[in-house]
Amino acid sequence: MVRAQQPRPRPPRPSPFPFHLPPSSRHSLACSAHALHVCYMSKMIQIRDVPDRLHKVLTAKAATAGMSLSDYIKKELEKSAASWSWEEIEDHLTSLPPIQFSEDPVEILRKSREQR
């Protein structure tokens, strides 16, 4: 009696994903072609419980700017994200070295005022 040989185990195949995804989410994607674009897809933000008055104000401002409400809010969020918070400003200022004056600042101001 001839025994059939057991097939050798195959080495693991490289993942088609260019980034780390947990195995559970890999299987939830329709195909690996979609997985390659997941990191480039835009994200959606939903805001709940927006007061009517705020919604009306934002809608009016968007209309004045000739934009949709979604585009107007996106532009406002970009401006907000680009500006520094008070905490960031404070952290930046405290990280700077102290300024050394050659003369007392009060005297500098007094002389400047006297020259006017």
Image (tube, rainbow, N blue to C red):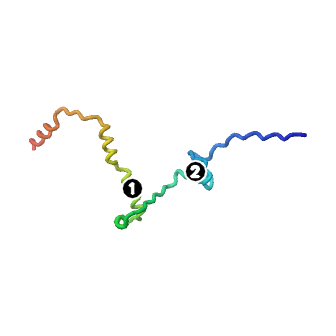
Please name the residue shown 57% across and 47% down the image. Answer: 21
Residue 91, position in %: x, y?
Answer: 33, 41
Residue 25 against residue 12 in the figure, above or below: below
Q: Amino acid at mark 1?
A: Leu
Q: Quadrant of residue 96?
A: top left
Q: Quadrant of residue 92?
A: top left
Residue 22 against residue 69 in the figure, above or below: above
The residue at which mark 2 appears reads as 36
Front position among marks 2 and 1: 1
Residue 106 against residue 78 in the figure, above or below: above
Tell me if 112 is positioned left or right of 19 in this view.
left
Number of callouts in the render? Answer: 2
Dot 1, how many residues are within 10 Å of its Cα: few (below 14), some (14-19), or many (20+)? few
The residue at which mark 1 appears reads as 77
Residue 102 against residue 62 in the figure, above or below: above
Tell me if 44 is positioned left or right of 9 in this view.
left
Q: Amino acid at mark 2?
A: Leu
Q: Secondary structure at mark 1?
A: helix
